[in-house]
């Protein structure tokens, strides 16, 4: 175990890695990965797997300690790649010595923004909140309060394409890994979304697929539903139809006004979005065929 450079008597935090794999279900996958990791001196801390019998698809998440591997990181990565090629699997390997850099996109609603920033400050979200992007200046003071850089890109029909390109340049410059639409009241272009597949998380104030689009609480009131919900999903070119990461509901009744539904819904939006963001940055989510597997 490496020493802590600040306090040599205290061991440094372990170097951990997370491996996510998906492929057609075959014999020998679990054994092949476990043998490869243990053969290089990695210590497997936990492993979770799922098989979709209808689709014959296999999914696995392995978290392991590489602090004392008997090779180097590049050699380990090459060995994992060889196993992936043998089983024709898609895989993603992440190490905990680099935190994901997150950009929060907002408009004027601030409840999801405050919640994410507070959770980050409390240590619940192990990432770097690198940037807050908005199409209005209303929440600049919030960004200053939390000492997060703020960028404003005002959107009009005539400037939308130019402004989106400016946003994309900024995201690239800041090496952003994840975009979170924390009640960003703009529809992203297909070109924007295409550059960030499964790396844009949106919170929709409805239990999708019900009440897509705008004013879902008004739609829910008109329909007389007894449950309202919120849905966090990856943004895709099809509006409000991307892979769902998390959902939750709360009961309502005929006594609830639209304002009551909005108030109840906002509480749900915060919790559901925070869960989805945390699961993504902890590498717990795999996507396939417009669905997700979310590992505990």
Image: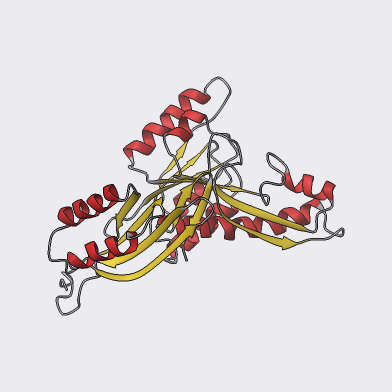
Instruction: Give the residue displayed 20% in from the left and 54% down from the top.
Output: 79
Q: Answer left or right for 90 relative to 13.
A: right
Front-lying residue, 157 or 136: 157
Front-lying residue, 133 or 231: 231
- For this orientation, the residue located farthest to the bottom is 9
Residue 242 placement (x, y as % from top left) = 56, 43
Q: Answer left or right for 162 relative to 241.
A: left
Q: The N terminus is located in which quarter? A: bottom left
Classify residue 75 by image quadrant. bottom left
Q: Is residue 217 visible?
A: yes
**In this view, 56 is above or below 41:** above
Residue 12 placement (x, y as % from top left) = 21, 71
Colouring style: secondary structure
Classify residue 125 by image quadrant. bottom left
Instruction: Give the residue displayed 28% in from the left and 65% down from the top.
Output: 34
Front-lying residue, 31 or 252: 31
**In this view, 17 is above or below 262:** below
- For this orientation, the residue located farthest to the top is 158
Query: For the image shown, how many numbered marks are present on the structure?
Result: 0
Residue 198 placement (x, y as % from top left) = 46, 44
Instruction: Give the residue displayed 79% in from the left and 51% down from the top.
Output: 258
Instruction: Give the residue displayed 16% in from the left and 53% down from the top.
Output: 74
Q: Is residue 282 visible?
A: no
Q: Answer left or right for 35 relative to 63.
A: left
**In this view, 34 is above or below 154:** below
- For this orientation, the residue located farthest to the left is 71
Residue 177 placement (x, y as % from top left) = 37, 46
- For this orientation, the residue located farthest to the front is 27
């Amino acid at each position: 175990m490496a020493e802590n450079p600040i306090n040599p008597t205290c061991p440094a935090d372990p170097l951990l890695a997370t491996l996510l794999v998906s492929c057609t279900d075959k014999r020998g996958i679990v054994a092949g990965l476990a043998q490869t990791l243990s053969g290089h001196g990695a210590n497997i801390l936990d492993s979770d797997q799922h098989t979709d019998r209808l689709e014959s698809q296999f999914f696995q998440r392995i978290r392991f300690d590489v602090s004392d591997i008997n090779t180097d990181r590049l050699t380990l990565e090459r060995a994992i790649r060889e196993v992936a090629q043998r089983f024709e699997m898609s895989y993603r390997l992440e190490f905990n010595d680099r935190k994901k850099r997150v950009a929060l996109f907002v408009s004027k609603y601030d409840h999801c923004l405050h919640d994410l920033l507070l959770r980050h400050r409390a240590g619940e979200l192990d990432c770097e909140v690198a940037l807050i992007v908005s199409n209005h200046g209303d929440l600049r003071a919030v960004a200053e309060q939390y000492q997060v850089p703020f960028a404003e890109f005002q959107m009009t029909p005539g400037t939308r394409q130019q402004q989106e390109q400016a946003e994309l340049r900024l995201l690239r410059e800041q090496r952003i890994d994840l975009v979170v639409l924390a009640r960003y009241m703009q529809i992203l272009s297909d070109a924007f979304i295409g550059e960030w597949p499964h790396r844009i998380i949106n919170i929709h104030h409805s239990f999708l697929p019900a009440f897509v689009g705008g004013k879902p609480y008004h739609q829910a009131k008109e329909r007389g539903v007894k449950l309202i919900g919120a849905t966090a999903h990856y943004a895709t070119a099809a509006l409000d139809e991307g892979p769902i990461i998390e959902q939750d509901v709360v009961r309502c009744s005929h006594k609830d006004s639209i304002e009551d539904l909005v108030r109840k819904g906002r509480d749900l939006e915060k919790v559901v979005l925070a869960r989805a963001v945390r699961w993504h940055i902890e590498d717990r989510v795999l996507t396939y065929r417009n669905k997700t597997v979310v590992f505990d």
